[in-house]
Image (cartoon, grey):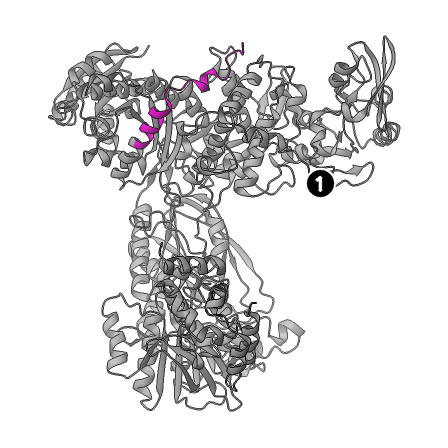
Amino acid sequence: MQSEIIKRTVELFNSEEIVRAIGWRKGDFDYDLNPSIFKSSEDLEKNFVYNDFSSANLSKFLIKISQKEDGKTLVFLKSCDTYSFNSLLQEHRISRDKIYIIGVPCEENLDPSKIKAALGEDVLSMSCDGETVTVETLDGTKTISKSEVILDRCLACKSRKHVVYDELFGEEGEVLDSKRFDQVEILENMKPEERYSFWRTELSRCIGCNACRDICPACTCEKCVFDNRDSGVENKVATNDFEENMFHIIRAFHVAGRCTDCGECSRVCPEDIPLHLLNRKFIKDINEFYGNYQAGDDIETLAPLTRFDAVDVEPSIVKTRENVK
Amino acid sequence: MNKSELLKEQVQRNSGVNVLKCMRCGKCSATCPNYDVMEYHPHQFVNMVENNQVELLMKSESLYMCLTCFACVERCPRGVEPGKLVEAIRLEAVRIKENNHLKPDQIVKKLTDKMPQQAIVTAFRKYTK
Amino acid sequence: MSVKEKTEFQPKIVAFCCNWCSYAGADLAGTNRTNYPANVKIIRVPCSCRVNPIFILRAFQRGADGVIICGCHPGDCHYITGNYYTRRRMTLLFSMLDFLGIEKDRTRVEWVSASEGGRFAEVMTEFTNDVKAIGPNRKLEDLRCKAK
Amino acid sequence: MQKIGVFVCHCGTNISATVDVAKVAETLAKEPGVIYSTDYQFMCSLAGQNLIIDKIKELDLTGVVICSCSPRMHELTFRKAADKAGLNGFLLEMANIREQDAWVHKDREEATLKAVALGRAAIAKVALNEALIPGESKVTKRALVIGAGIAGMQAALDIADAGFSVDLVDIEPTIGGLMTQVDKTFPTLDCASCILTPKMVDVQQHELINLMTFCEVEKVEGYIGNFIATIKKKARYVDPDACTGCGLCTQKCPTKNVLNSFNLNLDNRSAIYIPFPQAVPLVAIIDAAHCKKLQEGKCGVCAAVCAPKAIHYDDCDKLVENKYGAIVVATGFNPIEVHAFNEFAYDQSPNVITSLEYERLMSATGPNGGTVLRPSDKKHPKTIVFQQCVGSRDTTSRGKTYCSGICCMYTAKHAMLTREKYPDTDVYVFYTDIRTPGKGFDEFHRRAVEQYGVHYIKGSIGKVVPMSNGNLKVQASDLLMQRQLHIEADLVVLAAAMEPDKSAKHLAQQLTASMDNDGWFTESHPKLRPVESPTAGVFLAGACQGPKDIPSTVAQAGAAASKAIILLIKDKLKGNPCVAHSAENMCNGCGACANVCPYSAITYVEKEFRMPDRTTLIRRVASVNPAVCQGCGACTVACPSGAMDIFGFSNKQIMGEVDAICQ
């Protein structure tokens, strides 16, 4: 697949259809990829990688490029990334006519940290062949079943469908009937004290690195409210513990109804805090209260928090509903 | 809740009808093709259920005079659906079983020229062992 | 007031009231001399939809034990649709706080019209009692305490 | 450096009986920024105000806090006082220690503590206040009235009589609206034309009214005092200035079989026509869909016979753009289509008609010159059955949930007029409830029953079956007699529900005026602002706002006109300075704020930004029109970056209050 993609992209470079491409660049190891801009076909041919570790959602990089650069930019989007793309388009953050989308097929991505956790840290290379992952380590070659090392977010994949693209590699996928709310439900079924202690344990690990915010394709503010000295809630140096916890609640609220559930926040969290559960809780509530809504599905439907219905449920439903303890 | 109220509650729940939606326009009785042979007419079914008189309706022959043509359901401007109410009251009558359900020989006696065919079918349908 | 009552827990309660309905309703409670607990301190906002979730969390951060938001009844908003947005925002926010294990009775939304002075006092009394019953707000602040 | 003065009011004993005002003043004096604090008997008295003024001047105060009654009571009083002393009125805050403290608490200590907390909050807020100056915008001294029925005409006449120019637009080729089709009016039974046509002439002759018939409002932009409307002048193919209305063309036109919509298709007219003899302007118009010349290219008879050469087959739609200060909406209503009510056999028999059709049958300008003859065979009907509430009070998809309000009265009118003119006719009226709450209305209805012998029957028609001789078998219920009736009728008349005119929806979108679920325009406040749309500068006249009879329509039109005049008489409008504003450097241009804005006050502009690395970058950012913004704040919460904020209720100010209260 990688060679086909490169071939086609080189064609586009040569025909001057595009002037740059955003893709995944080979890092120190072939499982350690970096999102990057390729400005020439040579660079692309040499360093572009598309494999089971091409996890990063590239759509957010288009914002700055749309604002600053001339010429058409090519971007590779996996199915889940296309939802983020649509969201950005809906919010006028990117210009569609300056972007060429190649939809790339996606099975599940693999999680290098899971592989390392299972087979040790000294990994030289990893590759996946169908159901088996072969890993070269300093101690020799090892194998592990793919199903054990799939990236968490891919285990609850919501859709294999590319909702927007100019060109698609592979087959048109479908929206999946995922079980992505299962974890939310488990928490909902706990007693409030248990939920509290769960979140207290999880959030207490936050080191305030802002990786979740920086990676999130919905968090695209020119200046985050928590970075703004005039906002009254500047969070540069948290004066007390509450502030970081407030950061996560407000961040989730700010992306509520806009979050496409791409799962990047949890993927990049160095402390493995399941931040996506906060977003999913909002998505689940929105579906329950205001009808099913998938952000990024199309670019016409208004986000749930920017519309209303005269007969919406009252906030007291939080106290009276039975499906949450 | 006494027995009459309980019946009213059950009839409303089984039929999905809210009798309070009725605005007494009389369209149901105006449209009813079997009006003249009924002791209680479609709009009275609605009003009597509202006033806890389901038992009276259960005892009345009118219950089996409804042809279940659903013209009243179709035409009611308030979506009250009297026909569904009649069905639900019939169901109540059937549930009482021994007390008032029709026995085969009783049905034979009722087979007169005046008895509409659909009513006969309904009578058999409501017959339980 | 007895000594016992004085020493019992007195919650800090912040009430955001919209200028057109609920603030006027609170004024009417005053005009009618209808009592409610002094724990309630009102902040005037143009519309309930002005209330940012940040304000609510900020109040909890600074030691509030309960936050209540009052606006015009849905459909009666002075700004036509403001309170409909309030309703969605607060439903989701409260559900999230519940998800984090925070007591549900610390937050509330009520629609109080300019003519409902009596109801304003009732709502405030009830809310204050609810908050009193669950005690001081520690959880919200503690959420980030390092797990030991 | 803040220099804040605090003034605590006793309000006689209203506050001081429960709150230790001296202690409040003393405690607040220690707050940061406070340089003066005192208490006084009556702050709102002249002496009290002078105390504030003196202290502002003497101490050069930068902010003032008054701890007294509700700001809803005296905020304006104190702001004016501050202004008088040279301190911007918006640098003053009030702490409500009367209605929300002294009057609702009994314990003195508690109330005093609360007063201090409220005072602190006000001090925290005032320290962050900014001087605000209400913006001003000019008012275009011209009104646009949309819809020239009785409501629009009345509004236009009133506004023009006050000395302002008015453009009166109607979608039809003539003014007059639905009332032109009405025969007589209840409860006085005077002829509609006799009261309507003189008004139509007044409108035409008024030098400040510019009639724009056969025109449609396409687009409206702008805001109160400064609307810009694009109006489409539809092709009429007849030059209205040249046409004398002689009618020769209509007689010579070879196409005579076009259904006459003025008579609700009960008779025919020619392809070039004058809507009715009293039309204003009295000018012909070509119905392009049926004109042989325009459809097939041959004919041209009308142009040949027209002496003033008024006919132009090459006429086309034109767009004109005008500026207006105020807009009056008077788009009115129509009866609903009754095809869905198949039990009444409206589509099966020409003898089942609607009330408005009956109105035409009775009218002297109608198809039979005023003689009531049934449509199928022009026979005089002997038995007429009226059915009320057709589609009104109907919660199903066929009808409207509301009561149309006028049907009880016009049906009584029809029944009464029929019995008077044709005493040998039997008239039945089937009703659900009789609703006649106007002046002299119930007496009118009772007269129909008592003096005219109309059979009023509580019940409904269930089924109408047309017979081969044109008669109608009517099956109906009589609820009071507990019987089913079977009537052989000659004519069945259906009182169809009212619905808003179809043009209203597009107009509402253009005006950003809100509508209810049924499509009626919503008023700004159901009791206190009944003729104003929530969109400032837009006023509502007549049935576009809800079902109405003629007297209420005229009354409301007058009220809407006077509201428009109040606006037009001003040279400049002072805005509310507490409006939203967007910090462009933080704005993402995402559109969330505009989506929640009820007034469409937010637009987006492409703006160039200088970056720290000396490059420039063009970004889409929100821009608030302060003349349109009402300051609700919905946008401030929708905005994730906090770029959107409100003057007078800023994020920082409210958080300052929160912090002070939670201290």
Q: Nearer the viewer, residue A212 or D608?
A: A212
Give the residue displayed 56% in from the left and 67% down from the top. B129
Residue B88, percent from left and from top: 49, 64
Q: Is residue B66 left or right of residue A74?
A: left
Q: Is residue A56 magenta?
A: no
Residue D187, percent from left and from top: 27, 73
Q: Measured along the vertical axis of the image, is residue A165 above or below residue D194?
A: above
Give the residue displayed 51% in from the left and 82% down from the top. B109
The N terminus of chain C is located in which quarter?
top left
Using the rendered view, name the quadrant where residue C29 is placed: top left
The C terminus of chain C is located in which quarter?
top right
Residue A115, percent from left and from top: 77, 17
Using the rendered view, name the quadrant where residue D555 is placed: bottom left
Q: Is residue C147 magenta?
A: yes
Type of the residue with mark 1: Val
Secondary element type, mark 1: loop
Q: What's the chain of the residue with tag 1? A: A
> Label 1: which residue?
A175
Magenta span covers which residues?
Answer: C126-148
Q: Nearer the viewer, residue D286 or B25?
A: B25
Whether residue D276 appears in this view of the structure is no
